[in-house]
Amino acid sequence: MNVARWKAWFLNRLPGFQQAAAVFGVIVLVVYGWTIYWYLWKLPSWLYFLSLSEMLAAFAYAMAVNFLESVLVLLIPILLSLCLPIRWFHDQFVARGTTLVVLLLFALAQYLQVITGLQDIPPGMGRTALLAMAGIIFLVFLVGRIGLLRKAMEEIASRAVIFNYIFVPLSALSLLVVLFRNVFSRGF
């Protein structure tokens, strides 16, 4: 294949900007919501031994990491859209991508809670993770087949886009704070 055909094939399989922004909004809602929940949970105890600037710096680091995590999670449905046949994932990218990221992030949060609670990886976790992944794959493709579920996931994603307008600029500011604290405050 020549370069033009590869480029056309690649661009044909990529989701549109609006589709990716909708799925990214759902990711942002889950990831940033989870972090803000835990930040506010720990905030009362931090008031006893951290200054305001240290608490804001911790928040900036959390927002910067959340942005990088969110971009990495968005790459999963984008890579699936590139690798799978167009009918399977690309044609219903918003519904299937939203379902995938919500279920995947929920499963990861549950596994993190179990591992944190036990302070170790529980026996049989590999088998459980494989079963969870099989369930996630089944549900992702089921959502594409049932019109009501597909429309519900698309509506959730279209409404979650608003979180991009809030948290992406906050993340950019946080990245600048992290950059300033790590590069410019220590000197060259």
Image (tube, rainbow, N blue to C red):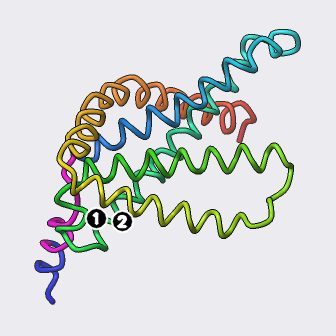
Residue 7, image x, y percentages:
17, 73
Marks 1 and 2: in contact by CB < 8 Å?
yes
- Residue type of the residue flagged with mark 2: Leu
Residue 142, image x, y percentages:
30, 57
What are the residue bounds of the magenta stretch? 8-18
User: According to the image, label 1 marks what residue?
Assistant: 81
**Residue 92 occupies quadrant:** bottom left
Determine the residue positioned at 85% across, 55% down.
Answer: 120
Specify whether 47 is left or right of 72.
right
Specify whether 163 is left or right of 133.
left
Determine the residue positioned at 33% across, 30% down.
Answer: 160
Determine the residue positioned at 55% across, 38% down.
Answer: 66
Can residue 33 be found in the magenta stretch?
no
Residue 41, image x, y percentages:
71, 19
User: According to the image, label 2 marks what residue?
Assistant: 79
- Residue type of the residue flagged with mark 1: Ser
Can residue 14 be found in the magenta stretch?
yes
Depth order, front residue of 132/106:
132
Q: Residues within 10 Å of mark 1 (few under 14, many from 20)?
A: many
Q: CA distance from mark 2 to mark 1?
A: 5 Å
Specify whether 71 is left or right of 94.
right
Give the SS element for disc 1: helix
Q: Residues within 10 Å of mark 2 (few under 14, many from 20)?
A: few
Give the SS element for disc 2: helix
Report the predominant secondary structure element of the magenta stretch: helix
